[in-house]
Amino acid sequence: MRVRTAPLVTAVALVLAGGLSACSQAGTAASCAPLLEPGPVSDSVVVLGEAGTPPQVSIPTDAIPTITQRTLVQQAENRDQVVTEGDLVTVNFAFFDGLSGEQVFATPSFGTDTGGYIVQDVADTEISAFTTAFRCAAAGDRVVVALSPKDSVAFAQGYGVMPGTPIVAVADVQGVAGLAAEGNVRSLPSGFPGIAVDESHRPGIVIPPGTEPTQVKSAARIVGDGKEIRAEDVVIAQVLTVTWNRDVVENTWEAGPKSLGNEETPGATFRDQLTGKTVGSQIVGMTPGEGGAQVSVVDILSVG
C-alpha cells in the first residue's frame, strides 16, 4: 500500500519525496505469501522447455477455471529476492485462448532470456489478476496463469478473443526490482546538494547556500550492480526534482515509477546522464535552465 503525503520543505531547506510508506524493497521467499494458488487448470497445462527458451505448450481445451489460478512450472534456485507488493517485474509472456489452445499474443522476446515487458505488482487495477500472479516469484521462474473468464475480459478484446473465453498465460520472470535504489552510499562532489533518506529509502534534497549551477552535472550516490544502461534503453525510475528555490517540480514517489524513455525520446531531460550508469543506482543531477536550476534524484529501477 502506498501512502500519499505531500512533500515538505523545512526550515533547514530539506525537500522530501513524501511521508513514510511501506517498505519498497523486494522481499525474500521465507516471508512471502502468494496471492494466487495452483488449481486444476493451471496444474494441467504442460510446458516443455527451460525458462528463457521457446516452450512447447499444451493446454487442455474446454477447461474453464472458475477462479484465476497460477502454477510455478519451473522455480529458480536463487530465491533471495522475490516479488512483493509494488515491485517491478520484467517478464516475457504469451497468452493462449483457453478453449482452443491457440496462441493469441506473445511479447517480442518471449522464449529468450533478454528483453521483456515491465509490469508492477499492484492489486487494485483491472489487470491485477495477471500482475499479482507474480507475487513471490523470482527471476528465472516460469509461471502458468489460468485466468477466469471474468479476469480475462481486460485482455480478451485486445487479442481477438471472444468475451467470456478464459485466457492462459505462460510467463518467464526475467527480473525483480524494488521501488528504490539500495546499496553503499558514496559522497557527492563539492557543490552538490545533500541527500537524506527515510527508512523506506525515499530521498530528500538539501539545497546548499550559494550560487545555483550553470552547467549540467551528475554523480552517483549509490552504484547499483545491475546491467549497464545503453543509449537505446528505456529507463524506469523514481524521480524527485526540485528547483534551486526548493519548489517541487516532480515527485514519482507519490504516483509511482515512470518511464524516462531513451536518449531519443522527446523531452527526455537528463536521460543522457543515465547512459553508462547501472541499474540499481541513485544518480543526483543538476540542470541549469532559463527558469532556474533544478536538482533531480533518480533511482534507476529497471530498463525495458
Image (cartoon, helix red, strand yellow):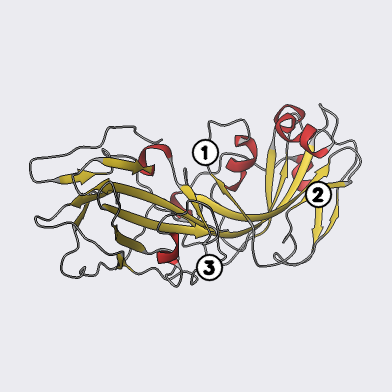
Residue 101 picture quarter? top right
Residue at (82%, 45%) from the top-left corner?
A: 96
Residue 158 picture quarter? top right
Secondary element at tag 2: loop
Tell me the distance, in whole angstroms, between the alpha carbons under discs 3 and 2. 40 Å
Numbered disc in front, either 3 or 1: 3
Of residues 107 and 64, the one nearer the viewer is: 107
Task: Please name the residue that numbered disc 3 is placed on.
Answer: 231
* Vertical placement of residue 162 versus 75, above or below: above
Task: State the mark number for residue 45.
Answer: 2
Q: Are marks 3 and 2 in contact (CB under 8 Å)?
A: no
Residue 74 percent across, percent down from the top left: 68, 60
Of residues 33 and 97, the one nearer the viewer is: 97
Secondary element at tag 1: loop
Of residues 296 and 29, the one nearer the viewer is: 296
* Vertical placement of residue 43 versus 190, above or below: above
Task: Please name the residue that numbered disc 1 is placed on.
Answer: 122
Numbered disc in front, either 1 or 2: 1
Mark 1 or mark 2, earlier in chain:
2
Residue 234 picture quarter? bottom right
User: Type of residue at label 2?
Assistant: Val
User: Type of residue at label 1?
Assistant: Val
Residue 12 percent across, percent down from the top left: 8, 46
Q: Residues within 10 Å of mark 1 (few under 14, many from 20)?
A: many
Of residues 185 and 15, the one nearer the viewer is: 15
